[in-house]
Amino acid sequence: MNEQTQMPNGQRIPNGMLQDNYPRNMWWVAARSDELTTKPMLRWLLETPVVLYRLEDGTPAALYNRCPHRWAPLSEGHVTGNKIICPYHGMEFNTNGHCTKAPTQTMMPKTAQIPAFTVREAGAFIWIWMGDADAIDRDPPDVSYQTDPDWTFLTGYYEVAANWVLIRENVLDLTHIAFLHKNTFKQDDWITAPDTYMDGETVCYEQEFDLAPLSPLFCAGMGLPEDKPIKRTQVGRMPTLAISFSDWNVHDPAPEAGRRSDFIMRGCHIVTPAHRGKTHYFWGAAFDVPELSQEVATKTKNSVIEAFDEDKHLLEKMQAQIAADPRGMDFLEVTLGADGAGIKVRQILNKKLAAEGRSIT
């Protein structure tokens, strides 16, 4: 490529997708609540091996997953009371990461201590703070609807071989739905992008649509036929980099006798960095309809998975090509009008990293 044709670096606001771009001083999701038991489990979070478990009283806990003696993974051990026991030599650790017993000797090794992480259980998930515990200045985002009996909450999980920012930008870019998901979402009126704005630290958008059939992904959950024109308003919020919501506010102008006319489907997109170039992606689809039938729940979940498989496939192809290309991030990146929310993601990311004394280029 000669000097005349060389592409400039168009990423004027970098997203750091090929490097460690993970803010530590914030809440990330470590696991679904129903994943955690007294049987310890390993999960890589922010390029860190973490052992997650519950004490016998049900309290969640998280430690660095290496015993300080000979580095055995504590996730291979077991829980007794409020202690986790190393499988190698029986050393016991409390939730602060302090060794409270070394059975092979009488003297307690004072240096036998491992990092402990603050965890909170909120909604359907276990949240973890992996930065400075003294910097915790808020609770995890409000996700109480996920366990509200007046809602039906469906959820799923992917490990995606792509940086978390690619997923975060993807789920806030609504215009790709009319193209990448034309055969699944079938919501082809999503050509124009909503205006985005900040409400404090929350990225927001709102967009109204004319009468049109609802995406078949969500008709069954609302008991609507797939060919019936309805009004809908899309309302999106990203209260933190870890989670965003997309509410499908649906109004049926001509409901059948005795039927509701208004429904909400709340999409939920949760991303947590795992290894470099890999992300834990938890998704949720919640209907303000209690106790959907198993048949409808299964049909809806399978349809969502079919659509999200399309995102996973393309994002992994993007990550792999960008990582393998010698130009890396040094290539033209064009920003369109629909990228307003994604640009705000990058601005928030860079601000958080700067506050932690880090930066991406």
Image: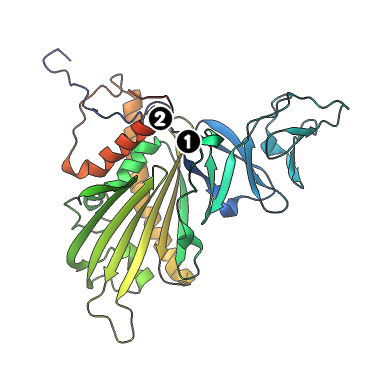
Q: Which element type, helix, strand or loop, lies under badge 1?
A: loop
| Position of residue 193 measured from the top left corner of the image (x, y, whole percent) | 19, 50
Depth order, front residue of 328/186: 328
Q: Going 66% across and 30% down the picture, which residue do you hit?
A: 114
Query: Going by the image, does 322 lie left or right of 196?
Result: right
- Which mark sits nearer the N-terminus, 1 or 2? 1
Q: How many marks?
A: 2
Asked if residue 16 is positioned above or below residue 187 in the image, the reply reads: above
Q: Of the numbered discs in the image, which one, if any, rests on residue 355?
A: 2
**Residue 313 location (% of width, % of height):** 35, 42
Quadrant location of residue 234? bottom left
Instruction: Kindly identify the residue that appears in the image at 13 percent across and 18 percent down.
Output: 5
Looking at the image, the residue that sits furthest to the right is 106
**Residue 217 is drawn in which quadrant?**
bottom left
Tell which of 257 and 97 is nearer to you.
Answer: 97
Quadrant where the C terminus is found in the figure: top left
Instruction: Give me the disc on residue 25.
Output: 1
Q: Residue at x 78, y 34 (%)?
A: 100
